[in-house]
Image (cartoon, rainbow, N blue to C red):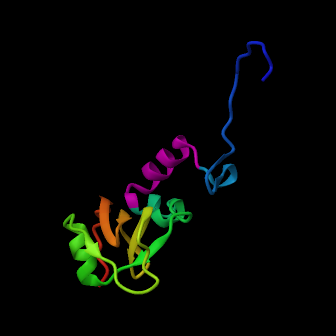
Amino acid sequence: RLGCFGHVSQLRRVQVGPFLEQDMIVLEKLEEIGHKNAGHEALDGCLQPVTTALDDIPALAVDQNEAARLRQGQAILLRGGDAPVNEAVVIALIRNKPVALATVEKGMLKPVRVFNFNQQPS
């Protein structure tokens, strides 16, 4: 504690979680890429997978039936000796693709936010 007042005249963000400044793309550059290539496909090359931002969250693999239930907002019972009993936040994955952010309460996996991707794993 300094015991005096201060102010910030400029603030530059050089990192946000695992994302470093050298990996960032300014909005103007994204707009340029989108306009030059006239489509979203060119912009897809600038994106990282959703799981990149969620790397520090514990992951749980689910099967196709469990994924379907989670997508409908239903909780599922976790089985197995290594299944967590309580966990604040986990990411449910099917074949390494995110299904939902969820909590684990008393062995029940409860979806909090469900991902709505156009492509479903087959």
Place residue 1 in its image quadrant: top right
> Which residue sits at x=69%, y=52%?
22
> Which residue sits at x=19%, y=67%?
72
Instruction: Judge by depth and name the residue closer to the eye, 92 or 121.
Output: 92
- Does residue 38 lie above or below 74 as drawn? above
- Does residue 35 lie above or below 102 as drawn? above
Left or right of residue 114, residue 34 in this image: right
Q: In x, y percent, where is residue 41?
A: 40, 63
Instruction: Judge by depth and name the residue closer to the eye, 48 or 66.
Output: 66
Place residue 75 in its image quadrant: bottom left
Dominant secondary structure of the magenta stretch?
Answer: helix
For the record, the magenta segment spans 25-40
Left or right of residue 70, residue 58 in this image: right
Q: In x, y percent, where is residue 118?
A: 27, 67
Is residue 112 shown in magenta?
A: no
Is residue 28 shown in magenta?
A: yes
Instruction: Judge by depth and name the residue closer to the eye, 54 or 88.
Output: 88
> Which residue sits at x=34%, y=68%?
106
Instruction: Judge by depth and name the residue closer to the eye, 19 or 4.
Output: 4
> Which residue sits at x=50%, y=48%?
30
Q: In x, y percent, where is residue 13?
A: 66, 39
Q: In x, y percent, where is residue 10?
A: 70, 25
Single out the residue that lies furthest toward the front.
106
Q: Quadrant of the C terminus?
A: bottom left
